[in-house]
Image (cartoon, rainbow, N blue to C red):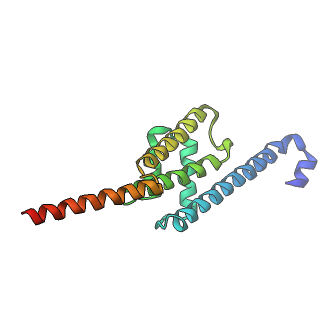
Amino acid sequence: MKSDLRKNPHRSIGRYWLTMSDASAFTLVRSGIAIADELRVALCDKEKLLITQSSAELAVLMLTAAEAGWGKGKVAHLVSQMVDVRKLDNHGKGRVYLLIRDAMTRLPMILWPQEKMQMRRELLEELTRQINLYQDDAPSVMTRDEVRERQWRESVLAMRQRETRIRS
């Protein structure tokens, strides 16, 4: 190709641009696979989840979401194809949604068609909304005073139950 480009650059410039386009696409796909691999490792190691898909399959799913412009209506579909979250508690679901949202934000912006950038924003907002929803449902960490008060209430309740048993 190099010698042909030198002999007749006007005729071969299309092939040159096609090669550059292929290299760019290859780099984008490789970065998508790397992001999917990091997501897979995080889900397996941090969340102790069994992920049956390979990194390439997760990347295909993420790239499909980007190319097709999946919006907020497809969040549950996207997450369910990656991970089975039905058995997780709310805090675990929130962490899974957080990892997936972080992976989707790290995908190169060029993967999203210009006319579907609004869908990307909606997808990320819905993932964030789900994270907040599951974190709100998670019990907050109790302070020392709250722990003491709970213990006191439990002890008072136990004393009342004993008194009731003695009277009956």
Residue, far right: 6
Residue 164 coordinates in the image, percent (x, y): 13, 61
Look at the image and tell me whether residue 138 can be seen. Answer: yes
Quarter of the picture holding the C terminus = bottom left
Residue 9 is drawn in which quadrant? Answer: top right
Front residue of this view, candidates 83 and 168: 168
Quarter of the picture holding the N terminus = bottom right
Front residue of this view, candidates 140 and 5: 140
Residue 128 coordinates in the image, percent (x, y): 52, 43
Residue 72 coordinates in the image, percent (x, y): 48, 38
Q: Is residue 166 left or right of residue 143?
A: left
Front residue of this view, candidates 138 and 154: 154
Look at the image and tell me whether residue 81 can be seen. Answer: no
Residue at position x 45%, y 42% from top? 74
Q: Is residue 47 left or right of residue 33?
A: left
Residue 68 coordinates in the image, percent (x, y): 54, 41
Determine whether 134 is above or below 126 in the image. below
Q: How many marks?
A: 0
Q: Is residue 48 left or right of residue 1?
A: left
Residue, far left: 168
Determine whether 12 is above or below 32 in the image. above
Determine whether 120 is above or below 93 in the image. above
Residue 41 is drawn in which quadrant? Answer: bottom right
